[in-house]
Amino acid sequence: MKLYHAKAPDNFQKQLQTFKALLKGSMMAKTSSFMLIAVSLVLAYKSRDNMLNVLLLLTGMASVVFYIIKHLSLQEIKQKSYTQRSLMSSISKFKAYMANRKKYEIYFLGFWIISLIPYATSFLDSKLHAILFAILYIAVVTVLGNLAYKKIDKIIAHLESELQSIQ
């Protein structure tokens, strides 16, 4: 009996550490979205002579800002300290957060990429090359994103099963 109780805090700390790593990953998604905003602003400044490019870049940037506000907020999930019960609750909220993010992320990022096409045509030989590059980029991001979401879903399921086995 003592052995079980001695191991439980270590398991809890390990689970808490894994959950905090997932939260850090989500914060990195938010940071990378801010980088997309910065890219849009820099490109809009560089193409300030072409008002259509500027408007499209700012529209793409606005979609990323909306995505950050609407789908990347972790305020309801983050806590200063955790108990076993609050960790379980936070994991459930994080699971819902990830499902919501997974549903909308590619649409917003795809729209942002499409908003870059007019600017990209000034560097590539033709509009066709810019469109093909955008489609290729969206496809790669979609595949890699789905792989990452599957991995995160497995980690969340593992955390949930471990926490339920401790109770």
Image (spheres, rainbow, N blue to C red):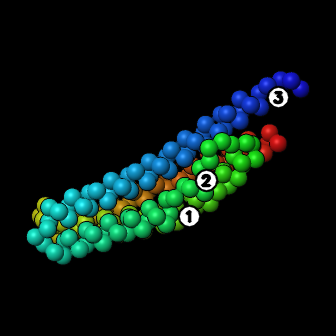
Q: CA distance from mark 2 to mark 1?
A: 14 Å
> What secondary structure is marked by label 3?
helix
Q: Which residue is mark 3?
A: 5
Q: Is residue 133 left or right of residue 122?
A: right
Numbered mark located on residue 100 in the image: 1
Q: Is residue 62 left or right of residue 85?
A: left
Mark 1 / mark 3, whichever is N-terminal: 3
Q: CA distance from mark 3 to mark 2?
A: 27 Å
Q: Which residue is mark 2?
A: 77
Q: Is residue 85 visible?
A: yes
Q: Quadrant of the N terminus?
A: top right
**Position in image of residue 41 (x %, y %):** 24, 61
Query: As rendered, which of 33 and 146 lies closer to the eye?
Result: 33
Amino acid at circle 3 = His
Q: Residues within 10 Å of mark 1 (few under 14, many from 20)?
A: some
Amino acid at circle 1 = Asn
Q: Residue at x 14, y 66 (%)?
A: 47
Place residue 123 in its image quadrant.
bottom left
Q: Is residue 38 above or below residue 114?
A: above
**Position in image of residue 111 (x %, y %):** 35, 69
Query: As rendered, which of 145 and 100 lies closer to the eye?
Result: 100
Give the mark toward the camera: 3 or 2: 2
Give the mark toward the camera: 2 or 1: 2
Amino acid at circle 2 = Ile
Mark 3 / mark 2, whichever is N-terminal: 3
Q: Quadrant of the C terminus?
A: top right
